[in-house]
Image (tube, rainbow, N blue to C red):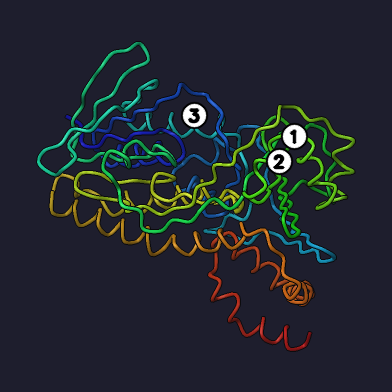
Amino acid sequence: MYDVIVVGARCAGAPTAMLLARTGYRVLLLEKAHFPKDKLSSHYLHQPAVASLDRWGLLEKIRATDCPPIERVSYQTSDVRLEASLLPADGHSTTYAPRRFVLDPILADAAAAAGAEFREGCTVTGLLHEGDRVAGVRYRTADGGEFTERAHLVVGADGMRSTVARFVEAPTIAENPPMTCTYYSYWEDLPTQGPSRHWELYERSGRSVGVVPTNGGRTLVMAYFPQSEFRQVRTDAQSAYMEAFRTTAPGLSDRLSSARQAERLYGTGEQLNFIRQASGPGWALVGDAAHHKDSIAARGITDAFLQVQMLTDYIGKDLHDPTALATACRRYARDVEEKFMYFYRGTLSVAELKVPEERLPFLRAISTNQTLVDRYFAMMAGLCTMDEFYNSEELRETLARA
């Protein structure tokens, strides 16, 4: 019997297994895929995610790959351009955007090194119960073998369409329809904008564009469209993709003309938005299984890391105490709902793909104050709240002068 079975070994499951194994628990980590395997992702690690990797002793492994450091961010809409150095989280102001076939194996290897038993090619087909409590899993291996394993706690870290969440019938706390669709590819030899490569964001009503350097000397270039246009866009996605740059970021379009698209076009219209109840008797959900939102704010990996730390900290050394474990899991579920609703609502606001005319004077005003620009991007990274930013005395004074 295991202490914990974690289903899903990517950016939520692997660190969950790692931290629980480091605490001394017997952990089984199951993954449907075989690593390394790529995955649809915006790749970006906000500063709190980088701080998590450092706390876990894994940051140097990311740095040891060819993933370039990112120290600046820019945003442009209409005639307004904001650019800033990234503010630190726990001393870390440099960020990264590693490919998933780089990041995920590093996390899974760390879980195995901590003592977790890692099994790839395993598909969970059901859950075991003792009364109303989840007590283990049934799973099938790639060669067709059927197995069962038991545990005090089953953690579903198996993504947006979580099998664990489906089997436990996890209630949905908040849900909104898909708001955007996205298409993206990777480019080589893309000229930099300014003295160094950085995270670039461009927006106009109906379109959003993101540019971020990643592994292999390649740059991820993403275009976002309203969900209502998905059927039309997908009929000729490549043309729509390139047209988004010409109309939203003409300077980027010019730079792309001298670069090379190194991979095929990827895309999805399945940008689900929800928050599920994140725990119940004998089970918990982390990462996209608990909380999924549009990728436009690039918060998926960062939020997964934050949830992992919360859950494992709350469990601590009390997993074998049924009352303490139940209390820890209830506290975790409550905090996922309360703390991540802010990021959820903020992301949905960005995913509306609207730039109201009245917003432009506001952006022009803060563009004159670099401190406010820095805090504006810090708000995106979760380093300060919207209330802290919009109710600051410095912002009120700057707007009054404008």
To which residue does mark 3 refer?
105
Local SS, label 3: helix
113 vs 266, left or right, is left
- The type of residue carrying mark 3 is Pro
Residue on which disc 2 sits: 233
In screen coordinates, is 251 left or right of 223?
right
Question: Residue 72, located in which quarter of the rendered image?
Answer: bottom right
Question: As displayed, is residue 24 above or below residue 28?
Answer: below
How many discs appear? 3
What residue is drawn where x is 80% and y is 40%?
Answer: 242
Query: Residue 19: which quarter of the image?
Result: top left
Q: Which amino acid, mark 1?
A: Asp
Residue contact between numbered discs 1 and 2, judged by CB atoms under 8 Å: yes
Which residue position holds label 1?
236
Residue at x-position 45% and y-position 48%: 305
In the rendered image, the vertical position of residue 9 relative to residue 370, given as above or below: above
Horizontal placement of 351 versus 202: left or right? left
Identify the residue at image location x=75%, y=55%: 202
Front one among 388 and 223: 223
Residue 12: give x, y in percent of width and height: 42, 41
Q: Position of residue 162 (x, y in %)?
A: 38, 39
Cα separation, mark 1 vs mark 2, equals 6 Å
In the drawing, does residue 44 fall left or right of residue 371? left
Given the image, on which type of amino acid does mark 2 rest? Val
Rendered-image quadrant of the N terminus: top left
